[in-house]
Amino acid sequence: MTMQLTNYLFFTTQCEAALAFYAQCGLGSVVELVRHGADGRPLANEAMRGKIMHARVEGPGVAFCASDNDDAEPMRGSAHFLTVDHSDKAHELFARLSEGGVITTPIGAQPWSACYGKLTDRFGVQWMIHCP
């Protein structure tokens, strides 16, 4: 059996802005994008027209999906754990992702890691950056 876990981020109306932000941070680029109501796709709510129904992002060692859903619940109880192979890159990525967000654990040496930090980004997504 082959399996792969892919995280799926749910936004209410800010998916497109979040994906642009993640691309600027260097996490990857959108490789698949479907919009609510486009190309004959179903539209449950007129307010969702043109919002992202499904997107897939891929980058170096990163893959996740995301969409806008008018009934999306706030992000909680989960975090993306990214392992980066160079401390300077970990610090750079942490700084980018934390812009407009809240730093929970400043990036630096921890008892379990030479370099670790945790934050919640401006879209409510939790990230843990680790460099062994």
Image: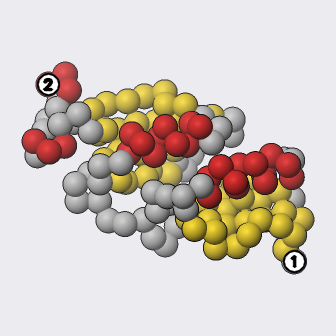
Place of residue 41 in the rendered image (x, y in percent of width and height, measured from the top left) = 17, 30
Is 7 situated left or right of 95 in this image?
Answer: left
Residue at the extreme top: 39
**Front-lying residue, 24 or 76:** 24
Task: State the residue at coordinates (87%, 77%).
Answer: 111
Is 12 situated left or right of 45 in this image?
Answer: right
Q: Secondary structure at mark 2?
A: helix
Task: State the residue at coordinates (35%, 53%).
Answer: 11
Q: CA distance from mark 2 to mark 1?
A: 54 Å
Residue 90 drawn above or below residue 51: below
Corner quadrant of residue 1: top right
> Is residue 83 something that shows in the picture?
yes
> Which amino acid, mark 1?
Pro
Place of residue 125 in the rendered image (x, y in percent of width and height, measured from the top left) = 50, 60
Residue 64 drawn above or below residue 110: above
The local crowd at label 2, few if under 14, some if 14 to 19, many if 20 or more residues have their Cα within 10 Å, is few
Corner quadrant of residue 42: top left
Residue 109 drawn above or below residue 39: below
> Which amino acid, mark 2?
Gly
Residue at the disc numbered 2: 40
Place of residue 48 in the rendered image (x, y in percent of width and height, measured from the top left) = 19, 43
Place of residue 119 in the rendered image (x, y in percent of width and height, measured from the top left) = 62, 65
Instruction: Using the image, tell me which numbered label, if any, was put on residue 33.
Output: none
Instruction: Using the image, tell me which numbered label, if any, was put on residue 111.
Output: 1
Q: Secondary structure at mark 1?
A: loop
**Front-lying residue, 82 or 115:** 115
Mark 2 or mark 1: whose residue is earlier in sequence? 2
